[in-house]
Image: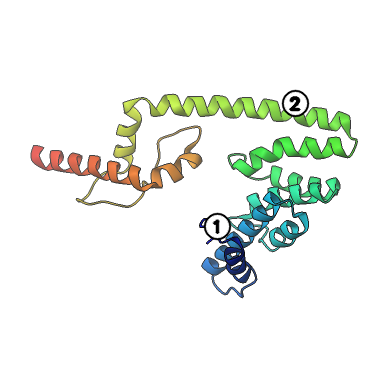
């Protein structure tokens, strides 16, 4: 509905999901996602109070928590409460450094510090963020270089040997890479899975032929 331009109808259903009673993990995750969507939509229309209310309903340790903490901080900044924003972003900064929201918090924390007048601390945090981003960029370049070598795919096949035709499960073991966690969603993508399944089927047939 939202994508079709029917914003109010879409917001109505997201609001219903955002406050529903949840008894299973799937329901709780769905509720979190609805509140996350509501919160970021409110941020886009510069309604900080509505964003704050929606993001506050997202669980602190659920799958949507990092994006919620990031948005929660921006909502507090829009409400002229940089100290509250700093608390949310500092909590976020302690989480998985591979997460995109955590990476953004590295630059958000010094921004909040600067708004609070803590200029020396803000400068130190900006410098640390620059160092961290540089290290992240190097690791990404290493991963890209590794993926461009055919040996990596052979290693992946070797770690996940074909036992039958038509295998469709995502690869459970990955070769050593600087960014294996980020690659998991890519490897789980339908296009990659179909291509990898075809490769393993061909390998399976080749092995059967040779025996």
Q: What element carries label 2?
A: helix
Say which label, 1 or 2, has the lower sequence index.
1
Left or right relative to 154: residue 15: right
For the point 64% across and 59% down, which residue is it?
38
> Counting other residues with Cα less than 10 Å from the Cα at mark 1, is it few (<14), some (14-19), or many (20 or more)?
few
Does residue 123 appear in the picture of this structure?
A: yes
Give 37 or 122, whichever is nearer the viewer.
37
Q: Where is 5 relative to 190, above or below?
A: below
Residue drawn at x 81%, y 40% is: 112
Does any portion of residue 211 appear in the rendered image? no
Q: Say which mark, if any, is on residue 127.
A: 2
Q: Quadrant of the C terminus?
A: top left
Q: Name the residue under label 1.
A: 5
Q: Position of residue 140 (x, y in %)?
A: 52, 29
Depth check, mark 1 against mark 2: the one in front is 1
Identify which residue is drawn at 40% across, 40% down.
174
How many numbered discs? 2
**Most foreground residue, 5 or 211:** 5
Q: Kindly identify which numbered label has been placed on residue 111.
A: none
């Amino acid at each position: 509905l939202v994508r079709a331009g029917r914003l109010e109808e879409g917001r109505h259903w997201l609001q219903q999901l955002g406050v529903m009673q949840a008894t299973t993990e799937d329901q709780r995750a769905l509720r979190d996602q609805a509140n996350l969507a509501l919160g970021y939509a409110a941020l886009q229309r510069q309604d900080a109070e509505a964003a704050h209310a929606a993001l506050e309903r997202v669980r602190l340790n659920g799958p949507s928590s990092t994006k919620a903490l990031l948005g929660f901080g921006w909502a507090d900044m829009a409400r002229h409460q940089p100290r509250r924003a700093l608390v949310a972003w500092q909590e976020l900064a302690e989480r998985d450094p591979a997460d995109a929201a955590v990476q953004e918090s590295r630059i958000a924390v010094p921004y909040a510090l600067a708004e609070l007048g803590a200029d020396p601390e803000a400068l130190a945090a900006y410098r640390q963020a620059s160092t961290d981003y540089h290290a992240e960029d190097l690791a990404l370049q290493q991963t890209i270089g590794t993926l461009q070598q055919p040996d990596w795919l052979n290693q992946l096949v070797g770690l996940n040997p074909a036992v039958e035709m038509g295998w469709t499960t995502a690869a459970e073991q990955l070769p050593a890479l600087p960014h294996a966690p980020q690659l998991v969603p890519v490897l789980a993508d339908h296009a990659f899975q179909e291509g990898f399944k075809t490769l393993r089927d061909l390998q399976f047939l080749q092995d059967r032929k040779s025996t």
